[in-house]
Image: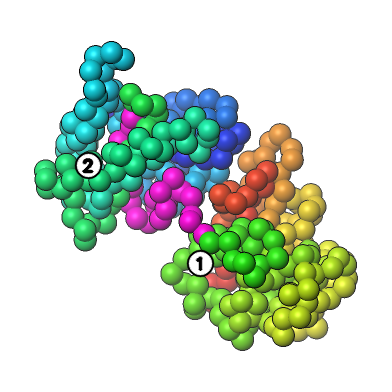
């Protein structure tokens, strides 16, 4: 059976997600035939002449920007009979599909317990009750067949296309999302002044992961450009960082009183600190290239060591603009002989935007 790639994304960004898959396929020296349905929040792409190892290497070389969750497998499979043909047994056809999948290179069992997913749309969310009803039963069926082990590495996935159709597959832990549907379950802190704080919290979880304590910790100095009312500043200050919150606008009173925060009333595009800082964060509403140049200036000059920033994408060629901004930052860092990693991702808490992260290697 042909291999398919499943990419979950934000509704309205299916074309960009498909372009991400195309870039991965090109590096893997293959092609993909992607089904792009605007507003579906999902791309199903058939991979020609799939090679699991080459695909894995290609994902590492070209990490997707607009994909929340990426995995490969087979499908779509029929998992329910036509209406009126009796109560459907969806577990049996799903288990059979996984049994076939387990014979394919790159998908060998044992696996972790499965995640049953659906697109992040109103139509997709209508399948959430069905997904929950299948969850434990499918895990039990796969465990009975010897396909599930709690110490396994690969995660099996099911995408419910609708109530009668599904794709199945698996993902490497270093490629797949650590959350079902690629959506983190983040608590909105009562103390935070705005919901934007969740965007930075997600960025830290995605880009820093298990290295958070080593890379971002108490005692470091940080600058938040475009800080008001203080959602991003709160994330940093709550971790013990000393934050210069730069904005001509007012901070929320709770943030302004925080001993870890200094409110600097200035233009975030022009202001610079007297001393270098470990972290620059920036959520200024500006043209993406102007923000990219700004971030590149801070990093190339040594004013900041690491950065997390947001690029607003109101234009049509959104992915092309992100790539142009990435080239600008990389060129400046290369000219300054600074070794760093640069990554972009459209986070769950992003809207018409992406979040970027630059981490110095040494």
Q: Nearer the viewer, residue 352 or 33?
A: 352
Q: Quadrant of the C terminus?
A: bottom right
**In the rendered image, which residue does mark 1 sit on?**
208
The residue under the point 46% across, 66% down is: 209
- Whether 136 is among the magenta residues is no
SS at circle 2: helix
Q: Which mark is residue 137?
A: 2
Q: Which residues are the magenta region? A: 166-186
Residue 162 in view of the camera:
yes
The residue carrying pointer 1 sits among few (fewer than 14), some (14 to 19) or many (20 or more) residues within 10 Å by Cα, namely: some
> Could you tell me residue 84's position as x and y percent?
28, 13
- Please give left or right for residue 361 compared with residue 132 in the image: right
The residue under the point 44% across, 45% down is: 181
The residue under the point 19% across, 35% down is: 95
> Could you tell me residue 145's position as x and y percent?
11, 43
Q: Give the image quarter of residue 4.
A: top left
- Please give left or right for residue 302 compared with residue 107 in the image: right
């Amino acid at each position: 059976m042909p291999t398919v790639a499943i990419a979950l994304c934000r509704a309205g960004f299916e074309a960009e997600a498909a372009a991400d898959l195309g870039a991965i396929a090109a590096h893997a020296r293959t092609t993909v035939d992607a089904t792009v349905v605007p507003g579906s929040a999902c791309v199903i792409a058939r991979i020609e002449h799939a090679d699991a190892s080459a695909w894995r290497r290609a994902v590492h070389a070209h990490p997707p920007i607009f994909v929340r969750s990426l995995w490969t497998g087979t499908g779509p499979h029929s998992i329910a009979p036509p209406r009126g043909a009796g109560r459907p047994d969806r577990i049996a056809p799903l288990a059979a599909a996984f049994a076939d999948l387990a014979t394919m290179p790159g998908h060998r069992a044992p696996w972790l317990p499965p995640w049953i997913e659906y697109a992040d749309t109103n139509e997709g969310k209508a399948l959430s009750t069905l997904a929950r009803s299948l969850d434990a039963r499918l895990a039990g069926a796969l465990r009975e067949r010897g396909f599930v082990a709690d110490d396994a590495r690969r995660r099996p996935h099911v995408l419910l296309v609708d109530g009668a159709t599904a794709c199945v597959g698996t993902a490497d832990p270093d490629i797949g999302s650590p959350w079902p549907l690629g959506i983190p379950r983040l608590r909105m802190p009562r103390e935070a002044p705005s919901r934007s704080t969740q965007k930075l919290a997600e960025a830290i979880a995605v880009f820093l992961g298990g290295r958070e304590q080593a890379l971002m910790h108490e005692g470091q100095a940080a600058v938040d450009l475009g800080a008001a009312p203080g959602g991003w500043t709160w994330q940093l200050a709550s971790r013990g960082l000393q934050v210069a919150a730069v904005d001509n606008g007012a901070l929320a009173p709770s943030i302004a009183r925080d001993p870890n925060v200094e409110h600097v009333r200035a233009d975030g595009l022009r202001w610079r600190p007297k001393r270098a800082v470990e972290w620059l964060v920036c959520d200024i509403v500006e043209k993406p290239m102007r923000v990219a140049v700004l971030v590149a200036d801070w990093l190339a000059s040594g004013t900041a060591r690491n950065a997390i920033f947001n690029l607003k994408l109101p234009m049509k060629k959104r992915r092309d603009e992100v790539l142009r901004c990435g080239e600008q930052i990389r060129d400046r860092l290369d000219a300054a002989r600074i070794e760093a990693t640069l990554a972009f991702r459209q986070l769950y808490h992003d809207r018409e935007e992406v979040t970027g992260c630059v981490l110095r290697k040494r």
